[in-house]
Image: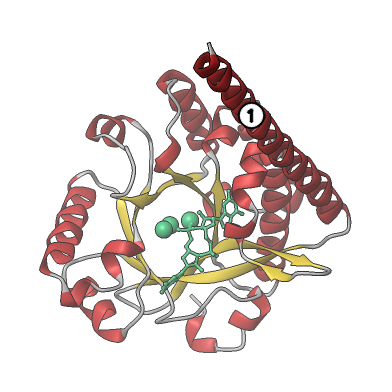
């Protein structure tokens, strides 16, 4: 009986500890949710842009929008510091709406200066299967006079939803608008060949974990070469991210990769900084 009592109080202690932990987590998530709402209202989020380069011409043909949070106390925060909490706290809808609005507005601003870059925006699977992303995007493009094919939506394949029907119809609605779709971080998630074949996706982005050290690793090179061949065989564009050096750039061009992105050209910066170097304008 003693042992049973001991066990019971131990498990009660566990439950108490677990409940407290849960409360802290919830409080943190709620705190962040409120802070983030404020951040959007106070305009504390910023978009930095990283060039996407045509490997045959060396010209910038697009830029990827990468979010940062200019936090009043904590400084410039990378997405890794807050994106998980955004997804978990259920605010990814308004968050992505803010990113899309700002990116399309910025795209209109560089177009006004005669610069014809595409803009790539990261969207979460939750955004895709949520309500009416296509309608929101169509309204934004119309409002700013940006052609649909100037916008690319990058979908990370790590979180493909169970409902393939929902995903397919969301992607189809966006493709119908003329917006381009890209599969991000390809090779690290769960995209199947069946999905690659059936989804109207324009571009495959090879994850930087295969690319950065490719010249020193024959397995990475074998994977990249195969993905490039696969993309070309399917008539899709292929972009390698995480290109850090000229020799990787050159090798990718030799094997027929279409585009590259990485520190070899620029870190993500405010878009106006990318205008300073005329060689980068596509
Ligand atoms: P991602 O979409 O794979 O973006 C590429 C990340 O690699 C960026 O990190 C970029 O700064 C970094 N990077 C670019 N070139 C190089 C390189 O040559 N070498 C190395 N080592 N790294 C490079 P960042 O900006 O910290 O973004 C991290 C992730 O956060 C992104 O990964 C994306 O998944 C997510 N993210 C960023 N902005 C948004 C957004 O607006 N919405 C959503 N849903 N996710 C976003
Ligand atoms: Ca991306
Ligand atoms: Ca990526
Ligand atoms: Ca990546």
Q: Residue at x 32, y 63 (%)?
A: 209
**Closer-to-camera residue (54/124):** 124
The residue shown at (28%, 49%) is 187
Where ligand 3 lies, by image quadrant?
Answer: bottom left
Task: Tell me how the rendering is colored.
Answer: secondary structure
- Residue 57, how many percent across, how many down? 34, 78
Residue found 67% across the figure and 57% down from its top: 103
Q: Residue at coordinates 53% horizontally, 29% vertically from top-left?
A: 173
Label 1 Cα crowd, 10 Å radius (few <14 / some 14-19 / many 20+): few
Q: Position of residue 84 (x, y in %)?
A: 59, 47
Left or right, residue 186 beside residue 99: left
- Left or right: 145 in relation to 65: right
State whether residue 55 is above or below residue 188. below
In this rendering, the answer to whether 80 lies above or below 179 is: below
Q: Secondary structure at mark 1?
A: helix
Instruction: Tell me if residue 188 can be seen.
Output: yes
Residue 138 in sight from this viewpoint: no
Q: How many marks?
A: 1
Locate residue 73 relative to residue 219 in the image: left or right.
right
Q: Which residue is mark 1?
A: 13
Q: Residue 86: where, in percent of width, then height?
A: 67, 44
* x, y percent for residue 231: 24, 50
Badge 1 residue CB within 8 Å of ligand 1: no
279 and 51: which is toward the camera: 51
């Amino acid at each position: 009986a003693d042992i049973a009592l001991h066990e019971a109080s131990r498990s009660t202690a566990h439950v108490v500890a677990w409940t407290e932990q849960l409360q802290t987590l919830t409080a943190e998530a709620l705190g962040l949710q409120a802070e983030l709402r404020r951040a959007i209202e106070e305009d504390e989020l910023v978009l930095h842009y990283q060039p996407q380069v045509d490997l045959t011409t060396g010209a910038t043909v697009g830029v990827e929008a990468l979010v940062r949070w200019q936090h009043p106390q904590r400084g410039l925060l990378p997405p890794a510091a807050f994106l998980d909490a955004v997804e978990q706290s259920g605010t990814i809808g308004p968050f992505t709406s803010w990113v899309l609005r700002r990116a399309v507005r910025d795209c209109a601003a560089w177009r006004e200066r005669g610069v014809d870059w595409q803009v790539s925006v990261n969207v979460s699977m939750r955004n895709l299967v949520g309500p009416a992303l296509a309608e929101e995007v169509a309204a934004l493009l119309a409002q700013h006079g940006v052609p649909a094919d100037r916008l690319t939506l990058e979908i990370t394949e790590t979180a493909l939803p169970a409902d393939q029907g929902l995903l397919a119809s969301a992607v189809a609605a966006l493709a119908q608008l003329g917006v381009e779709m890209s599969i991000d971080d390809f090779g690290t998630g769960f995209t199947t060949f069946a999905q690659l074949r059936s989804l109207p996706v324009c571009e495959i982005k090879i994850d930087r974990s295969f690319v950065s050290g490719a010249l020193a690793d024959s397995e990475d090179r074998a994977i990249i070469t195969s993905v490039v061949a696969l993309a070309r065989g399917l008539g899709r564009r292929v972009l390698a991210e995480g290109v850090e050096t000229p020799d990787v750039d050159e090798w990718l061009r030799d094997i027929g990769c279409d585009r590259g992105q990485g520190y070899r050209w620029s870190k993500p910066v405010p878009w106006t900084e990318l205008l300073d170097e005329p060689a980068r304008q596509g």
